Image (cartoon, rainbow, N blue to C red):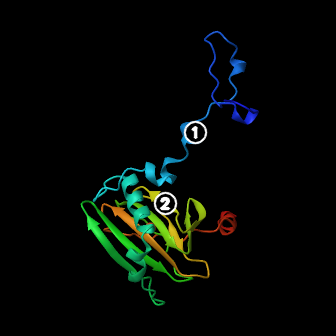
Amino acid sequence: MLSSPSDTPAVLCTAPHSSPKALTHVNSDVEIAGDPLAIAHLLPPVPAHPSTVSGFAGLIRQLADDRAAWAPLVRYDPTVRWYHRLRTGPGYEMWLLSWLPGQGSGRHGHGPSAGVFGVLDGQLTEHGRGSRALGAGTVRVFAPGYVHEVVNDGLEPAVSVHVYSPGLTEMPMHCPLVPDTARDALAW
Ligand SMILES: [Fe+2]
């Protein structure tokens, strides 16, 4: 029973010849049901060996929820960025990486590989098409040809997990991005 204006349904149906002004707002499925990717019980079970972007993202989320599965494996090395191959499957590899403050990947591509990666602990910054802070729980997706740089420019160590499909066979390094101010100066 509707008892207040706030109970008014958001989708108003109209007779075929009624005024279009009667339509006020139509909710999308996401507005009605919420983001299905954020509601764990609506997600399909993660297959033993995913083969899709959403499957790889599910694999990463599954790992993120199981800290005991990855935390004991993590090592931090101040001399070199530490990485560990967690698993392999048909057409993909999964890597665990640690990042001490100041450590970064350099600007690089991924050859023919597409990727999905997520931050498990701490915070990273990604410089690609713009810059963005990636906190724990963030999952990012990229296609073959994507170039970016990931760096821990915070004060705490960070841990991330990366899935590459197909497995990473090359990681070509690219010149660092030229800051806009420097590029403008060069243009003159
Ligand atoms: Fe990368």
Between discs 2 and 1, the one toward the N terminus: 1
Q: What x and y, as percent, mark residue 29?
A: 54, 37
**Would residue 187 be visible to someone looking at this image?**
yes
Which residue carries the number 2 mark? 140
87 relative position to 182: left or right:
left
Nearer the camera: disc 2 or disc 1? 1
**Would residue 105 be visible to someone looking at this image?**
no
Disc 1 marks a residue whose amino acid type is Ile
Q: Which mark is residue 129?
A: none
Tag 2, which secondary structure?
strand
Ligand 1 lies under 8 Å from the Cβ of mark 2? no
Q: What x and y, as percent, mark residue 144?
A: 39, 57
Quarter residue 88 falls in: bottom left
Q: What x and y, as percent, mark residue 65?
A: 45, 67
Which residue carries the number 1 mark? 32
User: Residue drawn at (47%, 65%), measured in percent from left and top?
Assistant: 118
Ligand 1 lies under 8 Å from the Cβ of mark 1? no
Given residues 31 and 175, the one toward you in this image is 31
Extreme right residue here? 5
Q: What x and y, as percent, mark residue 152?
A: 56, 77
Task: Using a 10 Å C-alpha cutoff, classify the residue at mark 1 as few (fewer than 14 neighbours), some (14 to 19) or many (20 or more).
Answer: few
Quarter residue 46 falls in: bottom left
Given residues 52 and 129, the one toward you in this image is 52
Extreme top residue here? 17
